[in-house]
Image: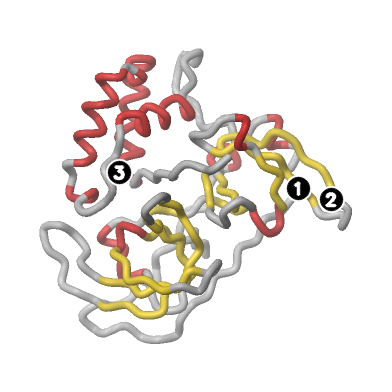
């Protein structure tokens, strides 16, 4: 089956939805409520120039995060009994770092480091064999060893049904989720960095790995970051100039 376009919410949008879910419980699944929230997000400065969010996408996020049967919000069941069975696997992610120095006007924030999350807070993404795009994981369903002795897990992608489940290689195609960037974080992205880039086409809008080839620093304004990033997609080597709102970064730990 051809996969639908994926959507990623910004950290501020996620925080807003988590707060609403905690306060209003099942009310957040109401169609009119989701429509109003989608309109609110679309009007925000962080969404300027981005693809318009649909109410069904907002509702889908609530359904995946907080099932109707839940009495209080809980984390996505990525760390469930199914997930625990694969805890022996360590997923390593390598990142390319550029030694190039930034202009004094835009000093690199080398102190930015992510807090190591607790086990129950870990969330993952997987690379699909169908299109080489990365999707957020909602559930780990099973695990096995392939003929080469490598561990594979069967995953359900967030926002998709059982007919889209896939077996993926843990070492090559599973990693901690990428983090959407805020305007204030643009200086942490430099040439050579591995990023997850939102690529929009005529028939699809997906997230692919890419490397930053060039950064054009520009003065920020009321709309946020105006910098332009030249990226090269890893899967097909094509290049594109994109804005910060289309990029997500890899987690960085001390």
Left or right for 182, reference 64:
left
> N-terminal of the two: label 3 or label 1?
3
Image height of 209 relative to 42, above or below: below
Residue 76 appears at what percent x and percent y?
A: 53, 32
Residue 160 appears at what percent x and percent y?
A: 53, 34
Q: Nearer the viewer, residue 163 or 126?
A: 163
> N-terminal of the two: label 2 or label 3?
3
Q: Is there a contact, CB below 8 Å, between mark 1 and mark 2? A: yes
Image height of 246 relative to 203, above or below: below
> N-terminal of the two: label 1 or label 2?
2
Q: Where on the picture, by quarter, is residue 77?
A: top right
- Give how far apart the Cα atoms at labels 3 and 1 are: 33 Å
Residue 72 appears at what percent x and percent y?
A: 45, 18
x 30%, y 56%: residue: 182
Q: Nearer the viewer, residue 38 or 121?
A: 38
Image height of 158 relative to 146, above or below: above
- Give how far apart the Cα atoms at labels 2 and 3 are: 40 Å
x 72%, y 43%: residue: 153
Residue pushed farthest left? 222
Left or right for 9, reference 123:
left
- Give how far apart the Cα atoms at labels 1 and 2 are: 7 Å
Residue 115 appears at what percent x and percent y?
A: 48, 53
Residue ID for mark 3? 12
Residue ID for mark 1? 152
Q: Nearer the viewer, residue 78 or 131?
A: 131
Residue ID for mark 2? 146
């Amino acid at each position: 089956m051809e996969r639908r376009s994926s959507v990623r919410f910004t950290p501020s949008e996620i925080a807003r939805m988590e707060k609403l879910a905690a306060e209003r419980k099942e009310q957040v699944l109401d169609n009119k409520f989701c429509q109003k929230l989608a309109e609110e997000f679309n009007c925000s400065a962080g969404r300027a120039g981005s693809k318009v969010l649909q109410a069904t996408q907002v509702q889908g996020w609530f359904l995946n995060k907080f099932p109707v049967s839940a009495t209080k919000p809980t984390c996505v069941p990525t760390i469930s009994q199914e997930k625990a069975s694969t805890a022996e696997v360590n997923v390593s992610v390598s990142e390319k770092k550029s030694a190039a120095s930034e202009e004094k006007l835009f000093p690199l924030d080398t102190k930015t480091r992510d807090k190591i999350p607790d086990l129950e807070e870990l969330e993952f993404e997987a690379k699909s064999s169908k299109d080489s795009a990365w999707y957020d994981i909602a559930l780990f369903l099973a695990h096995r060893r392939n003929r080469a002795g490598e561990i594979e897990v069967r995953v359900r992608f967030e926002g998709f049904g059982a007919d889209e489940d896939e077996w993926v290689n843990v070492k090559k195609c599973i990693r901690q989720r990428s983090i959407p960037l805020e305007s204030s974080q643009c200086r942490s992205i430099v040439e050579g960095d591995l990023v997850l880039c939102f690529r929009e086409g005529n028939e699809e809008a997906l997230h692919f790995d890419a490397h930053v080839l060039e950064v054009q620093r520009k003065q920020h304004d009321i709309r946020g970051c105006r910098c332009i990033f030249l990226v090269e997609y890893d899967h097909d080597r094509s290049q594109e100039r994109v804005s910060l709102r289309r990029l997500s970064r890899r987690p960085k730990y001390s």
